[in-house]
Amino acid sequence: MADSTKSAADELYVNGRIWTGRAPEVTALAVRDGRVAACGAEAMECAGPGTRVVDLQGRRVIPGLVDGHLHAARAGATWTAELHWTGLPDVPSALATIKAAARDRPVGEWIRAIGGWHPCQFTESREPTRAELDAVAPGHPVYVQALYEVAVLNSAGLRATGLDRLSGNPPGGWVERAPVTGEPTGRVHGMGAFTHCLDAMAVPGPDEQLRSTAAMFADLHAAGLTGIVDAGGFGMAPERYDPLFTLWRRGELSMRARLFLSAVDPGREQAQLDGWLRHAHSRFGDGMLQVLGIGEVVHFGCHDFEGLEEFRISEAAAAQLYDISYATAARGWPMNIHAVLDSSIDVILDCWEAVDRLVPLRGLRFTLSHADRIGARNLRRLKALGAGIVLDDHQVFKAAASEAAWGPGSMETVPPVADILAEGIPVAAGTDASRASSYSPWLSLWWLVTGTSLDGAQRRSARQLFTRERALEAYTAGSAWLSFEEATRGHLRRGARADFAVLSDDYFTVSAERIPSISAELTVVGGKVVHSTGAVG
């Protein structure tokens, strides 16, 4: 029975293997009013007449995962309209999803799989062909986009986009054509071509965007996620956030969301970001939804994309980045900026150090996303500013292409995990989903701890691998650090928010090759069950 000096717990989870975060595991967890009331033996003392007792039956429990880099507002709007190819092993499996969609959807409706997959995950090491897409969905336009690398359309898709009649190429992209006939093969490349195709697809209405965003969060909860940090990104005008805010106002938002806000139009970065800074406040919101900072697209002239082509930040772009960084720091906002190449990071840190001399950055949680090629000198500079790094797993797909661009052996230190940790730099982790990578946190954790890409090659050196515990810490408390919440989120110590997941397999002991297939049998946010397979409880 509960100690008379304490209130009884609402729920008592017992007989588990509970990793509370950088502490010995315990077997029991007490939850009261949405927070952790006690752990271990003390938790057993919190049982009262009204306490619901849940037998975990020896299962592994972890703090809820927090994806530190996910484009949730963008992905959520069309989530239910798209196919998600995470974990599919071969081209026939991918084609089967298209065939099923063609059977279930009205003739003429688009079928699409936009990002989150790559040919290297398929045994055939290729994407589907136009002919294969025609065979399984002749009555539907089909568009399948492999990350930002290539997209394939079927014949109906070429007609729906007008690419079958286009003699040249769309601005900023190109259309592959048969050498003899000049007929489109169905394959297109470049952001301009991708945008041309996506613009041909109807935009879901507000109600459908709401349902779609809620469905996305349900899928993320099924993977054990209880929080996301939305990195903003291309095209994220203020109205793109309406579904998130509507769910929040209605009390229907089940995922803790923290938002970075980006520039939308090249050449207008300062004015647009100044609008956010003037009319919003960092950390405005509540425990479920908060505006956080500026990023990840801060200035288009400073965005080095995947770092696979020659890139240089101009003096003019650097000067504007300084102005934006100063305005952000002066308002006390965090900033997150996309940077892959060490040369890009060099210029960014020049700006940040100049700002730091006027407005100290330490404590503002300025961060770099990706930082794949960051060198020792810039790690030291980052540490001196009190800034952090948000790692992701896009190289689980792109490692071969990156090594081809950067040279043999270059991937041994991508990312330089050991060097980052040795400097004591704060580290968060995420996916960069849903287009540049898969939304699966377990694929990301597998990449962080094994350094193996989906083509089967392990290019990162053993010295630069995370331990399983340290990777999980980055994916929980590390990502909570981005929003100043590491004291109350990302762990299960007394007083923390009761956000946790009960796993299908024990992440700490399961064989490495099985990590990507882990899922959640129960996911809890603020003490409330947001996902359950029925196996627990």
Image (cartoon, rainbow, N blue to C red):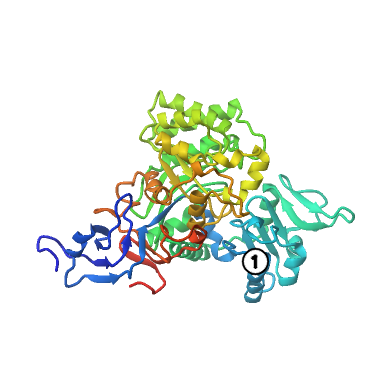
- Asked whether residue 138 appears in the rendered view, the answer is no
Q: Is 460 left or right of 244, judged from the image as shown?
A: right
Question: Which quadrant of the view contains residue 502?
Answer: bottom left
Q: Label 1 amino acid? A: Ala
State the image coordinates of residue 11 (x, y, percent, origin top left).
25, 67
The residue tagged 1 is 94
Tell me the SS state at disc 1. helix
- Taking the spot 66% from the left edge, 57% from the top edge, the residue there is 119
Q: Is 531 left or right of 122, judged from the image as shown?
A: left
Up-down relation of residue 41 to residue 467 (above or below): below
Q: Quadrant of the C terminus?
A: bottom left
Up-down relation of residue 23 to residue 106 (above or below): above
State the image coordinates of residue 247 (x, y, percent, origin top left).
42, 61
State the image coordinates of residue 217 (x, y, percent, origin top left).
46, 62
- Taking the spot 47% from the left edge, 36% from the top edge, the residue there is 419
Q: How many labels does the image show?
A: 1
State the image coordinates of residue 464 (x, y, percent, origin top left).
50, 42
Question: Which quadrant of the view contains residue 157?
Answer: bottom right
Q: Nearer the viewer, residue 487 or 168?
A: 487
Q: Is 21 left or right of 380, judged from the image as shown?
A: left
